[in-house]
Image (spheres, helix red, strand yellow):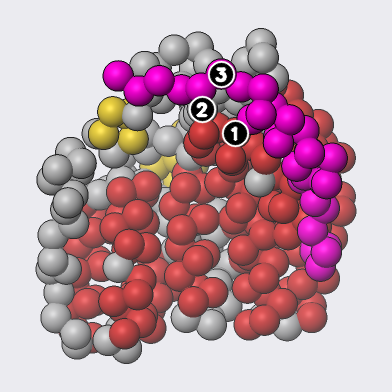
Amino acid sequence: MASQAGLTPNPAADWQPNVQSVTSYVNNLLATKSCESWSNTLQTQLSTFEATGMLDAVLDVLDAKINPEYGLWVTRYDSSKDVYYNLMKTPTSEVPYGIYTCAYKVMIMYNAGKRVVPYASKMVENAIKAICSRDPGVRVTYIFNPWATLGNVRENLVFYGNSAMVADYDAQIKANILEMLSALRGSLGKYKRSDGSYSYLQSGSKSTIYDTPVSLGKEEGDVNGNNLVMSFAMHICHTIGLVHMIPVFGEQHGKLMQELLAKAPKIVKK
């Protein structure tokens, strides 16, 4: 089915279910792949790591490789160029927003493993810095990822850390939340289209997803962009520690949708 849809099936995991094999596998990924690439590869295999009892072995490597100065899996940050250097010691292709593609996915793994992430305070500090930089990048995910990371970090500290860690997190967010929300509003505006919708790219819709054609790539909103933007209400609530989510849509929106569908012209497939 994957090849019929134009997708490349994921190859079988190149490791055996023992600590030595998994450790070698993860170390090699971190040494040879970009932050976004290796984190995506590991996250897609999360259920397999859990089923084989190897998730702790993966997290042990991530514990060892995290940079305590940044709370990220990088070697350094060059403030003059606003660029992180990955574990291969080369400039990452991701702007500071994008580096949180990695952190967001890795935090999912720490929460699945029920382990507190090391140097969480530094990760939070740099996520706030990325958000407040007002650099929206070229993909709306660059804006989404640091916010989603923060929510995952707070969950991690609440369940697997201690009250002091949660208090430190909340203090960092409280001190910066107004600037963060101001920056978010400005950044998301770069992706807003004239009809009120949002697109995945600043230039418009993304023509392909994982090499599969999904749109014409025009200056228009798309499902990915709108979905991520609408989810910000939830992620902001997670970030600031609200238990109850602010509803994005109400009953009146459902009625409006029914009215619009009833009035819409029939779609004629060609």
Q: Which residues are magenta?
A: 241-270
Mark 1: few, some, or many residues within 10 Å (few <14, many ≥20)?
Answer: some
Please tell me whether residue 112 is drawn above or below residue 152 in the rendered image: below
Residue 8 visible in the picture: no
Q: Position of residue 266 (x, y in %)?
A: 51, 22
Q: Residue at x 65, y 56 (%)?
A: 150
Identity, as a three-letter code, of the amino acid under mark 1: Asn
Q: Which residue is mark 2?
A: 222
Residue 103 visible in the picture: yes
> Pointers 2 and 1 in contact (CB under 8 A)?
yes
Q: Residue at x 84, y 40 (%)?
A: 252
Please tell me whether residue 15 is drawn above or below residue 108 in the rendered image: below
Mark 3: few, some, or many residues within 10 Å (few <14, many ≥20)?
Answer: few
Q: CA distance from mark 2 to mark 1?
A: 6 Å
Which one is closest to the eye, mark 3 or mark 2?
3
Identity, as a three-letter code, of the amino acid under mark 3: Pro
Q: Which mark is residue 226?
A: 1
Q: Nearer the viewer, residue 116 or 244?
A: 244
Q: Which sits earlier in the primary sequence, circle 1 or circle 3?
A: 1
Q: Which residue is mark 3?
A: 265
Horizontal side, residue 111 vs residue 170: left or right: left
Q: Does the magenta portion include 104?
A: no
Helix, strand or loop at mark 1: helix
Q: Which mark is residue 7?
A: none
